[in-house]
Image (cartoon, grey):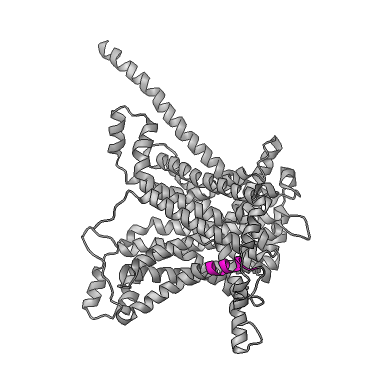
Amino acid sequence: MAVTTVNLPTAMLRLPRIRTATIWHFLVFVIVFVAVVTPLLFLVLGSFSQARMPSDFSLSTLSVANYVKVWGDPGTRATFSNTLWFAGGSTLVGLVIASSLAWLVERTNIPGKIWIYAGVPMTLAMPGMLQSMAWVLLASPRIGFINKAAMGVFGLSEAPINIYSMGGMIFIEGLRTVPTAFLMLVPLLRSMDPTLEEAAAMSGARPTSTLRKITMSLMLPGLIAVMIYQFTSALEGFEVPGILGMPAGIYVLSTKIYTVLHSSSALPSYGEANSLAMLYLLVAVIGTYFYSRVIAKSERFTIVTGKGYRPRVAALGKWRWVAFGLAMLYLLLSTIIPFLVLAYVSFLPYLQVPSAKAFASMSWANYDSIFQTESIGRILWNTVVMTFWVSTGVVVVSFIISFVVVRTKFWGRRLLDQLAFLPHAIPGIVMGLAMLWIFLQVDKFGFSLFGSLTSIIIAFIVGYMAYGTRVINAAVLQIHKDLEEAAKVSGAPQWRIFMRIFTPLLLPAFAGVWIWTMLHVVRAAGKPLILTNGPDNQVLAVAIWNMWDQGYTEAVGAIGTMLMIALLGITLLIRLIGFGRKTSPQ
């Protein structure tokens, strides 16, 4: 009786705790499931809908007419072909540049390594939309500064460069994909065991042969993974093909969907847009599937051993400064020159080729007019609010999901992890279209979500939590459970464990995810263009797009210059806060 009297209250006290934890885990699972699966469900149903507006959707309007019309159109096949050429070409350009820069930084004696390593990731502060606009000012056949100069110097009758082409789109998108690929390849090269490379060198193999037959072979699985990841990322590119392709009639799937929804000569055809999006989604899902397969089998190609080693550094000899010049050329083409072009244009009263007369006419008038515009304050405030809540929301949501996946024995934790990663396979403009259907259905109940800033924030959080969970999953795995157990034994509640143990240790990961999300939210125009309704909830990306479309080039230069300076400053500040406690080894 004594044993029963002692043990029964203990069991009764433990039961509510287990139930509470299970309910909390299940609630997280349900929220993520609804947030990810519901948009896909409406995307599929909407592709069969013959209703004129998503708010008129009903099961009685379903048919395959949209697929017959869209998939049977020769224009769709041309758009699909353009999409593959664009994504494949930009992936190849970006991977070649990124792998070359990563190899130079990690495996050679190139001078200025620290500047290259710091400068390449900083190119993320250059939004693809602004980068494209700057290159239009440089290489447009009609107004491009480079073309005007070449025609004047060499007496050419036609412009030698046409940025409004598939080659121009691939070039700019390729530059845009470099920093992410670079950050993925640098750790791969840094951790590679150089034993085989040293053996090849001792056998008399030339450095080029060693690089081609040994280094590249060892890196192949990692390169394939990066290539597939970059391909799926390039698939959802909207800003570059929107600025460079649409004026020339070169459409990819993302811009075609936008055109169907924003036609000036006909009412939007939401069902046809959804059927196009299904083709888009199919390609993205296949790419993500192969990426997951490569990652799952990565242990077959282990290149990191338990032995201590130092990666072999190749001596470039007389080519050291040539290599450094090529690295600087990338920074010039991707960031420095576009920034200088936009800054130059921002001070002009009207667009003109650089000359003494142009510099004499410079003033602050464009900046003054921007700040005197009534709507600019609201647009900036909307952008700040959106950026803050999306970046913070992604960090918080990703941490909660990662904690359940990594630190609990919840029965659905693996499925939860897969659900959190699934939005990576959904291109941004497709996610925006799917959310549009949901919000218009929700509006029937009087919530007024469609066109609001809240709708854009929700769409971005759902889309970017895939990246956040990948980073924070790895960070949580590095924290030993002994720290949690010691805190629990001391009587600390779960919220205090989060605040006093997880938050300080995960601060660098949180800062990294926050910076990455902030940079992508500000530069992304696809989702806001689909979900914005009216001027009251416009954000900066939409305002820049509209101003460029209406011909306000000088004002775009002023806003773009200030935006890039702000992004660079915020990035450096957050990195200082997030990584300031780490000291570099001496």
Query: Residue furthest toward the top?
Result: 1
Dividing the image into 4 quarters, which one contains the C terminus? bottom left
Residue 482 x, y percent position in the rendering: 27, 37
User: Measuring 64% from the left and 65% from the top, which residue is drawn there?
Assistant: 554
Q: Quadrant of the N terminus?
A: top left
Image position of 280 (left or right of 551): left
Asked whether 346 or 159 is in front, the reply is 346
* Front residue of 115 and 561: 561
Which residues fall within the magenta stretch?
338-348
Q: On screen, 445 above or below 159?
A: above
How many labels sit on residues? 0
Q: Position of residue 346 (x, y in %)?
A: 60, 65
The foreground one among 70 and 209 is 209
Q: Is residue 80 visible?
A: no
Q: Is residue 30 magenta?
A: no
Residue 28 against residue 75 in the figure, above or below:
above
Judged from this view, the residue extending furthest toward the front is: 360
Residue 120 in view here: yes
Residue drawn at (40%, 76%) of the image: 325
User: Does 27 sit above or below residue 172?
Assistant: above
> What is the magenta segment's predominant secondary structure?
helix
Horizontal and vertical percent for residue 425? 53, 54
Magenta residue check for 344: yes
Residue 551, given in percent of the width and then of the height, sits at 69, 65
Residue extending farthest to the right is 265
**Residue located at (45% from left, 63% from top):** 179
Residue at the image point whose x is 32% and y is 71% from the top: 215
> 508 left or right of 82?
left
